[in-house]
Image (cartoon, rainbow, N blue to C red):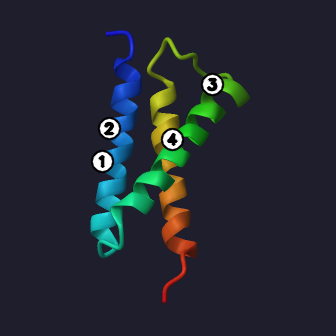
Amino acid sequence: MQYADIVAAVLGGLLLAWIADLLTGRRGLGGTILVSGVGLACGWFLAVRVFAVSTMDSWLWMPWALVGSGVCLGAFFLFRNKR
């Protein structure tokens, strides 16, 4: 499976978004999925392009992407508008 790492990262990001939405009172899964996806992309970019600690051939970039997703979700729930 050539793209198994990408599928696993996307599923991990969806799982993080779902858990974050459950923990914060179910305010909207669409927003958390969007924020999680942006965090995944940012984490991948840092691992592969900026710091060059990994390539797309290895699975080492996945923890970076998931940590980026977690950081973005944390910032989203910290700074969102609470009406």
Residue at 35%, 51% in the rendered image: 16
Residue 57 visible (yes or no):
yes
82 vs 46: above or below: below
- The residue that mark 2 highlights is 11
- The residue that mark 4 highlights is 40
- The residue that mark 1 highlights is 15
Residue at 65%, 34% in the rendered image: 46
Q: Answer yes or no: do the residues labelled 1 and 2 have beta carbons within 8 Å?
A: yes
Farthest-out residue, front: 30
Query: Which mark lies nearer to you, 4 or 3?
Result: 4
For label 2, the crowd category at 10 Å Cα-Cα, with few meaning under 14, some 14 to 19 and many 20 or more, is few
Q: Amino acid at mark 2?
A: Leu
Residue 74 x, y percent position in the rendering: 50, 63
Q: Earlier in the sequence, mark 3 or mark 2?
A: 2
For label 4, the crowd category at 10 Å Cα-Cα, with few meaning under 14, some 14 to 19 and many 20 or more, is many
Label 4 to label 3, Cα distance in Å?
12 Å
Residue 70 x, y percent position in the rendering: 47, 52
For label 3, the crowd category at 10 Å Cα-Cα, with few meaning under 14, some 14 to 19 and many 20 or more, is some
68 vs 48: above or below: below
Q: Which SS class for mark 4?
A: helix
Q: Which SS class for mark 2?
A: helix
Q: Amino acid at mark 1?
A: Leu
Q: Earlier in the sequence, mark 4 or mark 3?
A: 4
